[in-house]
Amino acid sequence: MLHKFKILLVTVLVVVFGTLGLAGCGGDKQENTSSGDSQSVSAGQKTTQDNKKESTADLFGKGQKIEGMTCDYVITSEDITAQGKMWVQGEKVKHETTAQGQKIIMIFDGNIFYSYNPDESMAIKFTNDDMQGDSKEIDTPLDFTEEASDELITELETVDYEGFRCRVLIVKEKGSKDEVKMWVREDCGIPVRVEATDANGIKTVMEYRNLKVGALPAGTFELPKGVQVQDISEMMSQMQKAGN
């Protein structure tokens, strides 16, 4: 899981800078502002816990059953920060972020990956075969709960975090110094804060804000008409032919 967290940060930052060269699931809760300051409660502030709680498997299962979701995200690792907006539906993921004053949109539909610059109406197209290593896919909040098994989880407390009841969980493999701490919303089973600490003590934090769930509009994961697309597969093929 920590490995996937690092991949998410690398994927967002590398692709962004490389390219440059719903109703809230709580229903009755007040929608958070992007900064989260107005409703933010200390992550360590403990509230009264219920005597009976659903299992973590059932908690995570609620998140895996959602039709779609959108949220703002902030990734912080040491002195590096990346932030933007995310749309998720099934295997399809879309990121929108701004780097060096330019908006970059990344779209992944399960096989095809686009890095799109709307200011220039240009996009770069990749496939799974074009991408290297695990960076071939874009991770989402749900990925942090998908592979977490009960025997690796320690529950710390239940807290109010930015206006929502969250269960604070630590996921740690036996014999490993890597650790992932999650604040998981009880109403929808989605983490809204994840802290990953590696064996060297380096902490990476992912925050998901303004979370909304529900089926997304048609065309959410499509490029606008008229966008000029550069196909990496074709470019590599032409380069190989030229070198022969």
Image: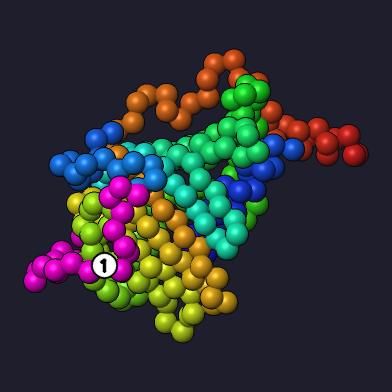
Q: Quadrant of the N terminus?
A: bottom left
- Picture coordinates of residue 173 (x, y %)? 42, 77
* Residue depicted at x 43% and y 64%: 195
- Picture coordinates of residue 59 (x, y %)? 22, 59
Viewer can see residue 37: yes
Asked whether 139 or 183 is in front, the reply is: 183
Task: Give the vertical position of 9 relative to 241 (above or below).
Answer: below
Q: Relative to residue 34, is residue 188 drawn left or right?
A: left
Viewer can see residue 90: no
Quarter occupied by residue 152: bottom left
- Considering every residue shown, the one lying at the far top of the view is 226
Magenta region: which residues?
37-63
Asked whether 225 or 208 is in front, the reply is: 208
Q: Which residue is mark 1?
A: 45
* Residue depicted at x 62% and y 32%: 102
* Residue depicted at x 11% and y 68%: 50
- Picture coordinates of residue 204 (x, y %)? 50, 63
Asked whether 142 or 99 is in front, the reply is: 99
Task: Give the vertical position of 2 relative to 192 (above or below).
Answer: below
